[in-house]
Amino acid sequence: MKTAAELAAFGGAPAFAEPVHVAQLNLPDREQVRRCFRDIFQRRRFTGNGPLVDTLEQAFAERVGVAHAVCVANGTVGLMILARALGLDGEVVVPAFTFAATAQAVSWAGLTPILCDVAGDTHMITAATVRPALTQSTTAILGVHAWGRACEPEALQALAAERGLCLFYDACHAIGCTHRGRPIGGFGRAEVFSFHATKIVNGAEGGCITTGDADLAARLRTMRSCTGAAAEPVAWRLNGGMSEAQAALALVSLQELPRNIAANRQRYEAYRAGLGDVPGLALVGYDAIEANNFEYVVVEIDETRTGLNRDLLFRLLAAENVICRGHFYPGIHRLAPYAGSVSTRAGSFPQTDRLCARVLQLPSGQPVSCAAVGRICDLIRGILAHSEEISARFAAAERGGRLIAHESGYSWYDSDI
Amino acid sequence: MTIGTGGFNPRIRQRARAADATTPAIRCIDRLAIFGGSPLLSSPTPAAFLPDIESYLGLLDQIFEHRRLTNDGALVQRLEDRLGRHHRKRHCVALANAGLGFMMLLQLLAGGRRGEVIMPALADPGLPHFIDWAGQTPRFCDVDKDTHALDPQSVAAAIGERTIAILAVCGSLGPGDITGLCRVAAARHIPVVCDATAAFATTGGDRDPAKACLAAIFSLDATTLLNGFEGGYVATDDDGVAAALRWQRNFCLPLPGPGERPPPYPVLGLNAKLNELHAAMALLSLDRLGERLAAEALCCEAYRRMCSRLPGWGVASGSRGGWAPCAAVATVRAPWPLSRDQTVALLRAEEVAVSPYRSPALHLAPGRSGSVSGSALPVAESLAGDLLQLPGADAISPAAIATLGEYLASVAAHGAAIAARLAARGIA
């Protein structure tokens, strides 16, 4: 365990020689991927909903237990075309505590995101937090399964039914997760997953929309391409298809999903063993009776008990080459173009603000060994054990311009590379 | 129906299907593929111009070793650098695809207003959709009959208070009078952006015909000259536009740091990042671009010879003014005995990869909304019924084009009978 003086921020050697990141960065078996690429070159079919995309859609639909899976260029594009394909018009209630793309996709679809605060314990919207945001102009609720935990499917569905609204989900965190034993992917009218390289299924970029609605799936397939006959009449189309290269990577990665979930779980358990009893530091837990992918190792930091805040811990760890992430920071209500717009008419989002100031995502994924997790835990315990001294020393060093800027170049957002 | 003396020349099919010695001589139109015969071009074309798979796998290994698959990776940066040098532009911003580039650029230029984007009615069918996504309305203008591009004078008449941008299109015959178009636009302070997805600028800097445009958007789709699986990029000399697009393609993140300012445009973020798998392919395709352009030029010459011998056919593509088209295009008109669509049906059955080109005119597309400049757009409407896209050098050889020409000459000789039989099948 380092002393305060040994911390890299104050001139000590970083704990890790190379940066350790929060992203999954699970690389699928290289030989299998190489074989897939040889086949692609042989077929000379590179994009335009080729055979690998078709295979991936079937495999993912089967995995999620839905009738239809529609692969797209990325999760944001998936949300954009889904919002249009649902025939919505007006306002869509969206959590303020989510990644920017959730609200941006709604805006691109010509709809108005109305931000809604989340519950402090689950980090997600609930029927109770959504209800005050509803008006005559509300057309839909867009829930987000934060950290792979289900976002109140029954209660939100009941509210949607009561008010005649559409319910759909951003499920970008939730591949391989369940709610009451049912795989996430079949709730609401449709759900959107991400195959970004930082997610547990890696397609470099990529996304997939899942639904049980055959007509909706047909519209989505038409909308994701600007060419070809329209299976269903749609007004808006775009270039949103997935390439065979993305599909190749994602297919091999999907085969490895159980193994990667198991490895994530081991890392998560190592974090729990290392940090579970640290006062003021609460590790987000997962329901033992549900499946989760353990993609996100998230802690809440209570400054009043730890003696230093999340931002300072982030900076100290970054100096040690432990690159965490202030997930999500800031809240959507503080981002352009939403700050001060009709989207923030609720006025205040106290739980979102609280979480944005306290939540820290810790490194996990294939490049992070359980031994590395142990070292990260030791670092954190050491920092928090000397928090008073470190805070004072940091403040003095900052005033005197004596901080070692190991963390320069890393921001809250690009730290998941 | 039996074709009389001098019917379909049997040598044509024998040449096209050299491997199939059992193919009987074709003496009646029943032997046309659309009526049940064997296709003319049944064997796949060698995989020309593809990057070497071993080179691609070498880059794939690099990607794996760096464990960086997206988010402005090393190959994307290398690609942007090489494209910038090729076009002699200060910036080339790589994107997940060109369509997202149009959406971003038009949303950026609108600056929060809702207005109109002037564009030709003869263009890629995706363009009006991208304008919709950007929250704008397309305003369709007619095109010049010789260049198939926007006519500066008709655009001048179409510019109004709601105009936020002009979307020039560089088609199979190049960008037309884009200098004149930019002059008209500049006089009204309207930005011009160029759709260069159907072409590739073979020159840059002062010789770039689109240099007066604010930005040009290129495609890295597998069907274009530069195959990057999927992808696109915006080439511009404008530092502010480039900075805004780079920020916008990554969700408008990260937020500006202390003392930093956001780009000078109110942009809406999205995910439009090009990934490393696609950048690798585009880089290797760029290595073979010269070879590809030379082959396309040979095919173009072969098509020119073919068309010169066919009644009603003309070539509507070719390198000119520093632009090379991605597609070989022909006009098919009377006295050719078949309609363009009948010709497409006939040739597709023969496994010749043809398609109607930019058809229908966009203002006539089913379900399309948007305004039309003038009472009608006769040139675009007429061309949309005539243009036929032919296979490029990656799918056909000059020798096969010669064979195709002989086949089409035989079709011409029996055109009336074929047209009648197709019409009876509902193919008009």
Image (cartoon, rainbow, N blue to C red):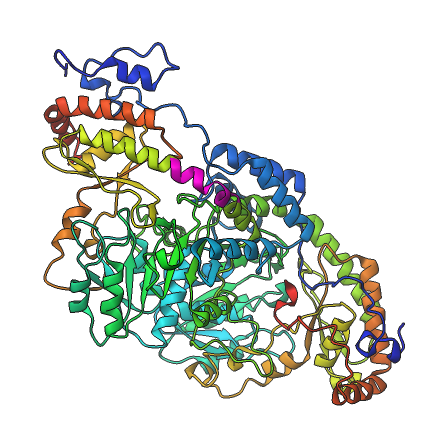
Question: In the image, what residue occupies the spot 84% across and 65% down?
Answer: A375
Judge from the rendering whether residue A129 lies leftward or rightward of residue B15; answer left or right. right
The prevailing secondary structure element of the residues shown in magenta is: helix
Judge from the rendering whether residue B255 lies leftward or rightward of residue A304; answer left or right. left
Question: Which quadrant of the figure has residue B10?
Answer: top left
Q: Is residue A405 above or below residue B37?
A: below
Q: Is residue A201 above or below residue A410?
A: above
Residue B286: x and y in percent read: 48, 45
Residue A312: x and y in percent read: 74, 81
Is B71 part of what is drawn in magenta?
A: no
Q: Nearer the viewer, residue A289 or B239?
A: B239
Question: In the image, what residue occupies the spot 26% across and 53% down?
Answer: B123
Question: Which quadrant of the figure has residue B374?
Answer: bottom left
State which quarter of the image contains the N terminus of chain B. Answer: top left
Q: Which residues are magenta?
A: B284-294
Question: In the image, what residue occupies the spot 36% across and 28% down?
Answer: B397
Judge from the rendering whether residue A287 lies leftward or rightward of residue B193; answer left or right. right
Q: Nearer the viewer, residue B5 or B35?
A: B5
Residue B303: x and y in percent read: 26, 32
State which quarter of the image contains the C terminus of chain B. Answer: top left
Residue A143: x and y in percent read: 51, 69
Question: In the image, what residue occupies the spot 32% across and 77% down?
Answer: B113
Residue B118 visible in the displayed image: no
Q: Nearer the viewer, residue A106 or A185?
A: A106
Q: Residue furthest front?
A: B206
Question: Which quadrant of the figure has residue B213?
Answer: bottom left
